[in-house]
Image (cartoon, rainbow, N blue to C red):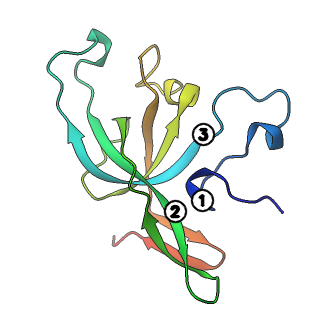
Amino acid sequence: MRKPFAFDNPLTLALSRRERGPEARGSELQMFLARVTGHVVATQKDKSLSGQKLLVVEPLNVKYDDANKPATLGNTGRAIVAIDCVGAGENQLVLVVQGSSARMTDVTKNMPADAAIIGIVDSATYAGKTFHASKE
């Protein structure tokens, strides 16, 4: 059984390089769930970032109850600036990629990006526990 490693978060959708095999390239963490907590305004920036929406996201981890069962999504206290590729908004649960994967979207090709929001989460379930379900 593979143990979680990134942010102690079983909802991280990635394998370590060792687990992915020798052909794997890029960072250890490829895709994870986060909550949009703010935005960034930068009047002076690389010209390739002009017109791009920059959001602050906080990676999430799974909190367990006394019976060691998944209980809630918890905050990590970390902040990452990510380019928004999907029109996400404040407090939304989003899917984020980092490293070279952040430069593989139509929006971020050839940009100096290390993190990109690539999805807005409708629902998230782990071990039979639903942590998030869209209200719509």
Q: Is residue 38 above or below residue 124?
A: above
**As drawn, is 104 to the left or to the right of 45?**
right
Q: Is residue 29 above or below residue 129?
A: above
Q: Residue at x 58, y 88 (%)?
A: 66
Q: Is residue 92 visible?
A: yes
- Where residue 22 sits in the image (x, y, percent)? 85, 29
Q: Which residue is mark 1?
A: 8
Dividing the picture into quarters, in which one does residue 54 lie?
A: top left
Q: Is residue 33 above or below residue 100?
A: below
Q: Circle 1 sits in a helix, a strand or a loop, which is it?
A: helix
Callout in the foreground (1, 3) = 1
Mark 1–mark 3 CB contact (< 8 Å): no
Give the tally of numbered discs.
3
Q: Nearer the viewer, residue 16 or 84?
A: 16
Image quarter hosting the N terminus: bottom right
Sequence-wise, which precedes: disc 1 or disc 3? Answer: 1
Q: Residue at x 77, y 30 (%)?
A: 24
Dividing the picture into quarters, in which one does residue 18 lie?
A: top right
Q: Circle 2 sits in a helix, a strand or a loop, which is it?
A: strand
Q: Which residue is mark 3?
A: 30
Q: Amino acid at mark 3?
A: Gln
Q: Which residue is mark 2?
A: 61
Q: Amino acid at mark 2?
A: Asn
